[in-house]
């Protein structure tokens, strides 16, 4: 474990570059080695098996290459036989008919047939060699398959130890200044809700795929990776072929009639649902509680140093004009900073409280933000949206959109080769650190946020529910969507929303509302002007989408256990009462300490 001073975060880019990056990498390697030791994996035996396996695979590759040459030779030989027989027959026929010299025709024809017969023997030889190679390949493949099975067996215990939140644990272990929680529990949600105004999203167009909560020096945050639905226009196309006659000049002073064909094309626009991923970081801090602002990425990531300098000068002149014309003074409060580089790169011109803006963005805060925005060689540079709304801050980065760092499945880390498995794990851990840290970096860059430590929130009573809606939706989205979706669903996606109902001992009973769209086939006739001067109705087939919903009961239990602990508890029958009471119609899923299933008697 690395000990970092509390002021280490005051210059976040340097902290990552000079301390955190290497410390985290080393801890990831140590973490994997400790897992290996705990799993009692015989690394030497595994590597010996893998060496034999790779040797067999290499031999198979060589044999297949050799076989490929033989097959190619056989194909050309067969083609040659066919062509020689045909050519021989043609020459003999031409000689017999006197088209060419009889002796020459028959001689050439006979010679070609003799060569063809010789090639038949070659083809038989090649076919025999291919058959032998197939047998040899099968023999080596069986050996390779057996070795691969042995290699996986030697890694079975280690592979079973992977968890969803391993990288989060490693993050907290490396730098306790930033805490990542094992689960986003009701207490943390209530804390964010009561103190900062954070709310769960209840409408049926956003579902949580993964959620990760935590805190920076006691100030809470939550990552939300959401599956979202919106509507967009879709242009449908239809065609119709028309036939008509026209009278044209025949070029000789007369006329003639021509029949012409024309394909008419028509379009019809109608709304359709579409689905996308959207990841945000929401952070609560009571500093500057009256301030709101927004900033969006500039294009400096794609600029040279000279272009950035010109951009800053151009922005400064533009800002001068905007200030003189009162274009930024809705309430007469906007006052530009003396740091034109910060104003240009951060570009938060809609700020509504200059005193609190300066409280956050001190000279050190401005310096940190500039370094972060220009530091694409260390991090990601200017790839983030930053919105502050009173005590809540919203960060959306380009690098986290579509990234699997937060919710990468433990199954993807499993491998039969211990050496490769370690590299996969360490590479994943390094990427996790960079992705998560540089989502937090805009917040860490503000010294005031690090100096303001949130007071502990005391609850007078416990919570009825054991799991937040966000974690329930994450669990539900990991199941087969067919368990929840309406049978009439025609849309490409389904949005799953959790609605708490009650609890059974330590488990939550919730309803999963599955929002999707049915589709009705429609035909619209669109008049299109044809070459005959008349309008023709062109049929355009399209789909009318209508919202539908299906509700399915869902059981979620916060076990508080690791994967191995849960597996052992299940084998010992700890969950028999729960399962027997409801009966699970789907496979029980364990993810991030949560056990969940759809009850049979739903």
Image (cartoon, rainbow, N blue to C red):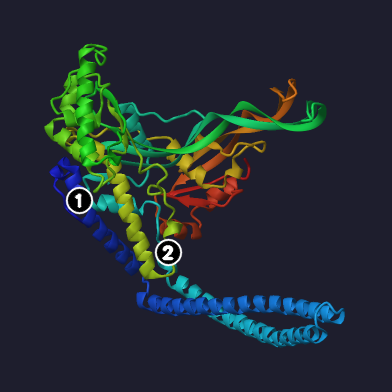
Point out residue 600 in the picture as x, y percentages from the top left corner: 62, 45
From the image, which quarter does the N terminus lie in?
bottom left
Residue marked by disc 1:
17
Point out residue 192 in the picture as x, y percentages from the top left corner: 32, 32
Whether residue 370 is visible to the viewer of this picture, yes or no, is yes
Query: Alpha-carbon distance for marks 2 and 1?
Result: 31 Å
Q: Secondary structure at mark 1?
A: helix
Q: Secondary structure at mark 2?
A: helix
376 or 505, which lies in front? 376
Of discs 2 and 1, which sits in the foreground? 1
Whether residue 216 is visible to the viewer of this picture, yes or no, is no
507 left or right of 372 in image: right
From the image, which quarter does the C terminus lie in?
top right
CB within 8 Å, label 2 to label 1: no
Residue marked by disc 2:
159
Q: Quadrant of residue 453?
A: top left
67 left or right of 313 in image: right
Point out residue 122 in the picture as x, y percentages from the top left corner: 67, 86
399 or 195, which lies in front? 399
126 or 398, which lies in front? 126
Q: Quadrant of residue 327?
A: top left
Q: Of the residues under marks 2 and 1, which one precedes in the sequence?
A: 1
Q: Quadrant of residue 162?
A: bottom left
Q: Residue at x 24, y 48 (%)?
A: 377
């Amino acid at each position: 474990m690395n000990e970092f001073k509390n002021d280490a975060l005051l210059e976040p880019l340097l902290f990552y570059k000079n301390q955190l990056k290497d410390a985290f990498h080393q801890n990831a390697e140590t973490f994997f080695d400790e897992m290996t030791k705990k799993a009692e994996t015989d690394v030497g035996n595994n590597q010996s098996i893998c060496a034999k396996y790779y040797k067999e695979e290499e031999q198979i590759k060589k044999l297949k290459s050799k076989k490929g040459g033989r097959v190619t030779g056989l194909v050309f030989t067969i083609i040659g036989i066919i062509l020689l027989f045909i050519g021989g027959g043609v020459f003999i026929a031409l000689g017999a008919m006197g088209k060419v010299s009889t002796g020459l025709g028959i001689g050439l024809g006979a010679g070609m047939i003799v060569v063809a017969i010789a090639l038949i023997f070659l083809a038989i030889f090649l076919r025999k060699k291919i058959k032998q190679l197939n047998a040899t390949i099968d023999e080596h493949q069986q050996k390779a398959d057996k070795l691969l099975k042995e290699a996986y067996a030697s890694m079975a215990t280690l592979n079973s130890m992977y968890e969803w939140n391993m990288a989060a644990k490693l993050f907290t272990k490396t730098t306790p200044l930033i805490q990542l929680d094992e689960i986003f529990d009701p207490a943390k949600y209530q804390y964010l809700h009561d103190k900062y105004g954070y709310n769960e999203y209840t409408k049926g167009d956003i579902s949580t795929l993964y959620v990760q909560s935590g805190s920076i020096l006691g100030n809470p945050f939550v990552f939300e990776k959401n599956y979202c639905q919106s509507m967009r226009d879709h242009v449908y196309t239809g065609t119709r072929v028309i036939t008509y006659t026209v009278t044209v000049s025949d070029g000789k002073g007369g006329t003639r009639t021509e029949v012409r064909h024309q394909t008419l094309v028509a379009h019809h626009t109608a709304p359709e649902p579409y689905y996308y991923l959207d990841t945000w970081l929401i952070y609560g801090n009571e500093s500057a509680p009256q301030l709101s602002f927004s900033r969006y990425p500039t294009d400096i990531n794609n600029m040279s140093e000279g272009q950035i300098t010109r951009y800053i000068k151009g922005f400064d002149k533009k800002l001068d004009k905007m200030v003189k014309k009162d274009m930024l003074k809705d309430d007469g409060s906007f006052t530009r900073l003396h740091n034109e580089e910060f104003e240009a790169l951060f570009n938060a011109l809609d700020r509504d409280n200059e005193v609190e803006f300066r409280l956050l963005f001190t000279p050190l805060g401005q310096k940190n933000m500039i370094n972060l925005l220009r530091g694409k060689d260390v991090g990601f540079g200017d790839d983030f949206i930053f919105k502050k709304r009173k005590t809540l801050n919203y960060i959306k980065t380009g690098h986290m959109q579509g990234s699997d760092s937060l919710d990468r499945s433990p199954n993807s880390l499993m491998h039969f080769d211990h050496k490769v498995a370690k590299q996969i794990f360490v590479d994943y851990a390094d990427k996790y650190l960079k992705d998560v840290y540089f989502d937090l970096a805009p917040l860490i860059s503000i010294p005031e946020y690090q100096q303001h430590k949130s007071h502990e929130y005391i609850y007078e009573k416990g919570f009825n529910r054991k799991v937040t809606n966000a974690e329930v939706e994450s669990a539900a989205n990991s199941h087969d969507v067919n368990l929840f979706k309406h049978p009439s669903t025609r849309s490409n996606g389904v949005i799953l929303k959790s609605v708490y109902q009650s609890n059974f001992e330590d488990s939550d009973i919730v309803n999963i509302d599955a929002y999707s769209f049915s589709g009705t086939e429609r035909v619209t006739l669109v008049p299109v002007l044809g070459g005959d001067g008349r309008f023709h109705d062109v049929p355009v087939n399209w789909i009318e989408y209508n919202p539908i919903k299906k509700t399915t009961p869902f059981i979620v239990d916060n076990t508080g256990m690791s994967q191995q602990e849960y597996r052992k508890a299940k084998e010992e029958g700890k969950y028999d009462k729960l399962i027997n009471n409801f009966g699970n119609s789907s496979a029980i899923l364990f993810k991030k300490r949560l056990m969940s299933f759809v009850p049979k008697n739903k």
